[in-house]
Image: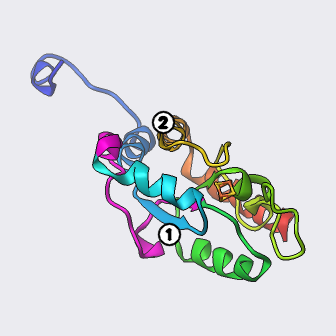
């Protein structure tokens, strides 16, 4: 039903918060942060055949300040932990994070002295994408889950939960 059906024919009611969240959910600009083999699958998902434009996510932002969703795809070494945190801190609110692949979720097969065992004690993770590596479809599914999450989200609640998560992890 087009908007013209409502013109002169009644009322269209919503809350500003819902309208804003709907807009945000349809334009989650990703910040690709590929650090290992999962990054290849992420690049594949960004290619034309997977058509991320369907979800408004076809425009990668290589500046954290213009990105909504940090996609951390791959292994994080201990030396990279402060870098990851800095990049996250540079993103404007509201912001979301995908942990793509077993290494980002839990360290994966690299249970070594130099590998950080999952990123969620460094930055708050919104969607975990399992697999070694996950297929591009896994990333698309995560996008759909995120869109649902954003639509039901209160902006202030997200900020408070992130702050609690960050202080818990530090
Ligand atoms: S989860 Fe597997 S594919 Fe992904 S970065 Fe780790 S080892 Fe590579």
User: In the depicted view, which residue is nearer to us: 106 or 89?
Assistant: 106
Q: Residue at x 35, y 45 (%)?
A: 52
Quadrant into which the C terminus falls:
bottom right
Q: Which residue is mark 1?
A: 92
Is 63 on the left or on the right of 155, as rendered?
A: left
Seen in the picture, residue 81 relative to 138 is either above or below; the reply is below
Give residue 22's quadrant in the image.
Answer: top left
Quadrant in the rendering for residue 16: top left
Residue 71 can be seen, yes or no: no
Q: Nearer the viewer, residue 36 or 157?
A: 36
The numbered disc on residue 144 is: 2
Label 1 beta carbon within 8 A of ligand 1: no
What residue range appears in magenta?
49-72
Q: Is mark 2 within 8 Å of ligand 1?
A: no
Residue 68 magenta-highlighted: yes
In percent of width and height, residue 105 lies at: 73, 53
In which quadrant will I find the N terminus?
top left
Percent of width and height locating residue 163: 72, 63
Which secondary structure lies at badge 2? helix
Graded by Cα atoms within 10 Å as few (under 14), some (14 to 19) or many (20 or more), the crowding at tag 1 reads few
Classify mark 2: residues with Cα within 10 Å, few (<14), some (14-19) or many (20+): some
The spot of residue 42 in percent (x, y) is 48, 54
Kindly report the distance in space between the C-alpha atoms of the residues bearing marks 2 and 1: 21 Å
Mark 1: which secondary structure? Answer: loop
Please report whichever mark, 2 or 1, sits nearer to the chain's N-terminal start: 1
Rendered position, 91 above or below 50: below
Q: Position of residue 55 (x, y in %)?
A: 35, 41
Q: Ligand 1, what quadrant?
A: bottom right
**Taking 71 as reference, is 113 above or below it?**
below
Q: Residue at x 13, y 16 (%)?
A: 9
């Amino acid at each position: 039903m087009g908007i013209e059906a409502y013109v002169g024919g009644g009322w269209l009611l919503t809350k500003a918060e819902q309208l804003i969240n709907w807009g945000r959910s349809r334009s989650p600009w990703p910040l690709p942060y590929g650090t290992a083999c999962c990054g290849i699958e992420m690049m594949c998902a960004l290619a034309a055949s997977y058509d991320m434009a369907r979800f408004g996510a076809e425009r990668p932002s290589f500046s954290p300040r213009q990105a909504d969703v940090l996609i951390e795809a791959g292994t994080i070494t201990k030396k990279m932990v402060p870098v990851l945190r800095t990049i996250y801190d540079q993103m404007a609110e509201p912001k979301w994070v995908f942990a793509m692949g077993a290494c980002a979720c839990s360290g994966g097969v690299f249970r070594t002295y130099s590998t950080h065992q999952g990123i969620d004690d460094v930055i708050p993770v919104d969607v975990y994408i399992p697999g070694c590596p996950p297929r591009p479809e896994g990333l698309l599914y995560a996008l759909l889950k995120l869109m649902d999450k954003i639509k039901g989200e209160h902006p202030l609640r997200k900020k408070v939960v992130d702050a609690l998560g960050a202080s818990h992890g530090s």
